[in-house]
Amino acid sequence: MESSDLKRKIITKINALEEYKLEELYGYLLNSSNSNSDLSDWTNLSEEQRKGIYKAILELESGEGIPNDTVFNSIRSRYV
């Protein structure tokens, strides 16, 4: 596959992403371009911790999470 074909396919995929996935991709690209590939934190987690993180990601992707603003407003109302 030629570089131009690959770029076109990548752009098509990017244009179809939902906003949160686009932000994830941007973060990944920044880390990748900054050569931030240190996985020591991840590899130092136990299997149970990794499974918990994967479970949380799946819950968020299925809409089961609590919006950030809701959490912060709740905390502010208790402590401010």
Image (tube, rainbow, N blue to C red):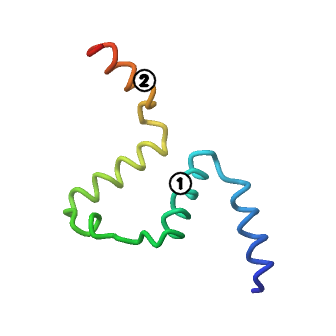
* Marks 2 and 1 close (CB-CB < 8 Å): no
Residue 45: x and y, percent? 22, 62
| SS state under label 1 | helix
- Circle 2 crowding by C-alpha within 10 Å: few under 14, some 14–19, many from 20: few
Q: Mark number for residue 57?
A: none
Position above or below: 5 against 23? below
Q: Quadrant of the C terminus?
A: top left
Q: Amino acid at mark 1?
A: Glu
Q: Which residue is mark 1?
A: 24
- At a point 76% along the width and 62% down the height, the residue shown is 12
Residue 54 placement, left or right of 67: left
Position above or below: 63 against 8? above
Choose between 47 and 74: the one closer to the eye.
Answer: 74
Choose between 75 and 34: the one closer to the eye.
Answer: 34
Q: CA distance from mark 2 to mark 1?
A: 21 Å
Q: Amino acid at mark 2?
A: Thr
| SS state under label 2 | helix
Q: Mark number for residue 70?
A: 2
The single residue placed furthest to the bottom in the displayed view is 1
Quarter occupied by residue 8: bottom right
Residue 27: x and y, percent? 52, 57
